[in-house]
Image: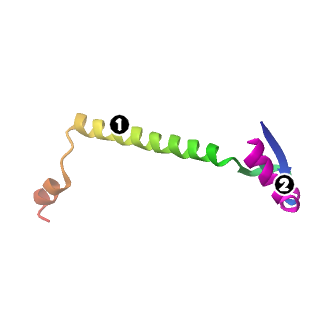
Amino acid sequence: MAIFISTIDAREDFSELLNRVQLDKERAILTRRGKEVAAIVPIEDLRLLLQSDNKGDLQDAMEALQEARDIGAILLENLKQEIGL
């Protein structure tokens, strides 16, 4: 569950906010002038997000490698030789 809190209120009660996030595993969405601007999440959530990003990057790299194999890409060293570098 996420709580919405203004940046002003978050600043005034920052220690309490951190305790809610850390101990109660709540997610805090910070707002400024009614617009969502940032979030404070438990470290476990951040680790999962980063792990997900890394898996996405790995999947993208694997797809790019397969595409290069499918279209017959050449090695950089071979290209340099071909153009005389």
On whether residue 12 falls in the magenta region, the answer is: yes
x and y, in percent, of residue 83 in the image: 13, 60
Who's the residue at 36% across and 42% down the image? Answer: 61
Who's the residue at 77% across and 42% down the image? Answer: 24
Who's the residue at 87% across and 60% down the image? Answer: 8
The tally of labels here is: 2
Residue picked out by circle 1 = 63
Outermost residue toward the top in this view:
70
Q: Indicate which disc residue 37 carries.
A: none
Determine which quarter of the picture holds residue 70. top left
**What type is the residue that disc 2 sits on?**
Glu
For mark 1, does the 10 Å Cα neighbourhood hold few (<14), some (14 to 19), or many (20 or more) residues?
A: few
Who's the residue at 29% across and 36% down the image? Answer: 67
Alpha carbons under labels 2 and 1: distance apart: 45 Å
Viewer-proximal residue, 6 or 19?
19
Q: Nearer the viewer, mark 2 or mark 1?
A: 2
x and y, in percent, of residue 65 in the image: 29, 40
Q: Is residue 61 above or below residue 7?
A: above
Secondary element under disc 2, as helix, strand or loop, is: helix
Q: Is residue 40 above or below residue 64?
A: below
First of labels 2, 1 by sequence position: 2
Q: What span is in magenta?
A: 9-25
Residue picked out by circle 2 = 16
Q: Is residue 26 visible?
A: no
Viewer-proximal residue, 2 or 60?
2
Q: In the figure, is residue 61 to the left or right of 70?
A: right
Secondary element under disc 1, as helix, strand or loop, is: helix
